[in-house]
Structures are given as structure tokens and as C-alpha cells.
């Protein structure tokens, strides 16, 4: 994993995803949005996007304006985010 990536998004590694506030108004089925953490000196929270499958995996992204950065995956039976700069397959 790239050190810059780890420094920028490392606060999410191993975090219990149940602490994120779900935004039902813009979410549907396996495509969900959440209010994430405030990182560093930021005055705003991250906007998170979670794309689930019908099995046991959720891919997590941070929305950055008009783009999204993959930050890791979660197995729903574990409930924690595994930080990764490479999408889990």
C-alpha cells in the first residue's frame, strides 16, 4: 500500500462501519451513502459511498467532488473496513 494513501486515509483502517451515519434520502438497495469522519484539520466530514453485493462484501469509497476514491472493503459479518488502495476481487 502506498504510504501517501495510508497517511491520507489510514484513519479508516479497521474502523467499525456501524459508526457511520446512513443517508437514506440518497441511498438505495446496495448503493448507500454515509457521513464519514473528519480527517486531519478538515472542518467537514467525508461523504462515503458503499457499494454492496448480495453476498458478504461491501466496497467503500470517499466522494471527492465529482470523483470517488476507493478506500477499502468490508465483509458484512465482520463489520470493519479493511483499508486498501486496490479493489478487492
Image: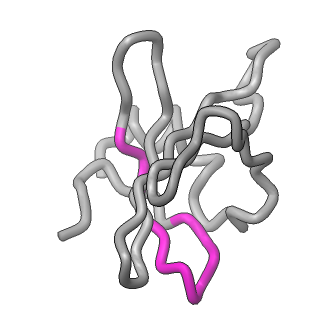
Depth check, front residue: 3 or 20:
20
Looking at this view, name the residue that lies furthest to the bottom: 77
| Residue in the picture at 25% in, 66% down | 88
Asked whether 15 falls inside the magenta stretch, the response is no
88 left or right of 15 in image: left
Looking at this view, name the residue that lies furthest to the left: 89
Depth check, front residue: 66 or 28:
28
Count the marks: how many? 0
Depth check, front residue: 83 or 1:
83
Q: Residue 85's spot in the image, x, y percent?
A: 30, 48
49 left or right of 14 in image: left
Q: Residue 38's spot in the image, x, y percent?
A: 76, 29
Q: Residue 46's spot in the image, x, y percent?
A: 65, 28
- Range of the magenta residues? 70-81
How does the figure colour the protein chain or chains?
one colour
Q: Quadrant of residue 23?
A: top right
Q: Residue 35's spot in the image, x, y percent?
A: 72, 37
Q: Quadrant of the C terminus?
A: bottom left
Against 86, is 26 above or below?
A: above
| Residue in the picture at 45% in, 59% down | 30
| Residue in the picture at 46% in, 18% down | 64
Asked whether 71 falls inside the magenta stretch, the response is yes
Q: Quadrant of residue 55?
A: bottom left
| Residue in the picture at 48% in, 26% down | 63
Amino acid at each position: 500500500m502506498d504510504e501517501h494513501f495510508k497517511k491520507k486515509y489510514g484513519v479508516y483502517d479497521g474502523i467499525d462501519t456501524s459508526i457511520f451515519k446512513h443517508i437514506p434520502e440518497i441511498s438505495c438497495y446496495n448503493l448507500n451513502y454515509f457521513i464519514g469522519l473528519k480527517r486531519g484539520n478538515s472542518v467537514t466530514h467525508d461523504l462515503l459511498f458503499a457499494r454492496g453485493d448480495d453476498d458478504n462484501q461491501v466496497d467503500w469509497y470517499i466522494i471527492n467532488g465529482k470523483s470517488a476514491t476507493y478506500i477499502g472493503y468490508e465483509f458484512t459479518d465482520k463489520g470493519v473496513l479493511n483499508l486498501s488502495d486496490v479493489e478487492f476481487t
